[in-house]
């Protein structure tokens, strides 16, 4: 008898079921190990920091994009507590727009019950989904977002209400990115704290390259206003919880600041919205124009953070934080 003439005998259902159960157990075990060793080890992301701090109460929650991160590099939270007795949590994230900041804020309200919100605003974060919806679905961030029921519930709500891709929620729930690194061959990029003690040598090419990266889409008023709505919903929720909200723009080098597209229009629209909500705004973008205060095209270095804190932030936060 030819092999092709032999009847096909289906696999017994029990064997199939046993294989499926074994696979599920192995996957669950691997996912559990990845959750502990990757998702919950270290404090690289805002959600990892929140997991470590949960159950405490923080006076100042700092949100924004990477321009706010040097506050942590320069140990401003420790200095503020030593000087004023107030605690601070810097939960900014690289490339984070208002939608991602809102995601972090909702988890922070549960974990650390902040009394004040300091929002570091950047115009680029209001121009594109790249800095908002796509940050929530970014596998590099999902990989280091601890699996928690409260975070899953917030992400599910964003999936329903904000159109976040369901695949991101599935990735988060199954630990797919924790088991399958999205950056097997990482390329050199922004190094943050590693360059914090450097001083920039700025070139026109570097400035333009950075601008092209931050503003990939042509500025559109309706897009900006939609993300303004997202941001001010965060502010409304904060104030409804009894929090005080303060908005700041941090210093930028003059060549970079002057190259920002449509910045005057953005500032005018932002100021109008903040006035209508009676939220204080401190524009410090021109406060430290000298290049000696920056480690790259637009981030404060240690000298810049020291000057910012001594000349502006300490008094600002002391006066705002007093009862």
Image (spheres, grey):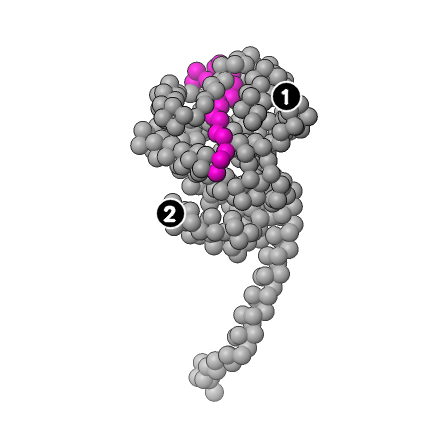
Of mark 1 and mark 2, the one earlier in the sequence is 2
Q: Which residue, given by chain and number where applicable, does mark 2 sit on?
A: 161
Q: What residue do we see at 47% from left, 54% from top?
A: 170
Q: Residue furthest top?
A: 290
Q: How crowded is the residue under tag 1: few (<14 C-alpha within 10 Å), some, or many (20+)?
A: many
290 or 265: nearer the viewer = 265
Q: Residue at (58%, 53%) from the top-left corner?
A: 179
Residue bearing the label numbered 1: 302
Q: Is residue 242 magenta?
A: yes
| Magenta residues, start to end | 241-259
- Image coordinates for residue 308, horizontal then vertical, percent: 58, 18
Q: Secondary structure at mark 1?
A: helix
Task: Locate residue 7, reporting x and y percent.
Answer: 45, 84
User: 68 or 217, which is in the foreground?
Assistant: 68
What is the crowding at mark 2: few (fewer than 14 residues within 10 Å), some, or many (at least 20)? few
Quadrant housing the C terminus? top right
Q: In screen coordinates, is 265 left or right of 1?
A: left
Quarter of the image where one finds residue 270: top left
Residue 207: image location, x then y, percent:
48, 20
Magenta residue check for 306: no
């Amino acid at each position: 008898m030819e092999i092709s003439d032999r009847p096909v005998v289906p696999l017994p259902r029990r064997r199939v079921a046993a294989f499926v159960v074994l696979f599920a157990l192995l996957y669950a075990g691997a996912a559990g190990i990845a959750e502990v060793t990757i998702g919950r080890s270290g404090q690289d992301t805002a959600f990892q920091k929140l997991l470590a701090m949960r159950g405490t109460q923080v006076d100042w929650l700092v949100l924004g994009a990477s321009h706010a991160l040097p506050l942590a590099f320069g140990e401003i939270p420790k200095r503020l507590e030593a000087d004023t007795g107030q605690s601070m949590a810097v939960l900014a994230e690289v490339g984070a727009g208002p939608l991602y900041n809102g995601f972090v804020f909702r988890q922070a309200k549960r974990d650390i019950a902040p009394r004040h919100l300091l929002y570091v605003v950047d115009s680029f974060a209001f121009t594109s989904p790249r800095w908002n919806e796509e940050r929530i679905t970014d596998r590099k961030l999902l990989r280091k977002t601890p699996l928690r029921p409260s975070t899953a519930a917030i992400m599910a709500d964003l999936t329903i209400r904000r159109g976040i891709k369901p695949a991101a929620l599935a990735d988060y729930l199954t630990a797919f990115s924790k088991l399958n690194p999205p950056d097997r061959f990482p390329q050199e990029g922004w190094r943050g704290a590693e360059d914090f003690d450097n001083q920039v040598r700025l070139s026109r090419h570097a400035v333009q390259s950075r601008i092209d990266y931050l503003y990939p889409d042509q500025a559109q008023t309706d897009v900006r206003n939609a993300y303004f709505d997202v941001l001010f919903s965060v502010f409304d929720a904060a104030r409804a919880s009894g929090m005080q909200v303060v908005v700041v723009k941090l210093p930028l080098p003059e060549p970079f600041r002057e190259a920002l597209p449509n910045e005057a229009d953005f500032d005018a629209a932002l100021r109008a919205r903040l006035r209508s909500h009676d939220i204080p705004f401190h524009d410090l973008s021109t406060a430290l124009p000298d290049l000696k205060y920056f480690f790259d095209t637009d981030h404060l270095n240690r000298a810049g953070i020291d000057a910012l804190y001594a000349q502006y932030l300490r008094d600002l936060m002391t006066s705002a934080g007093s009862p």
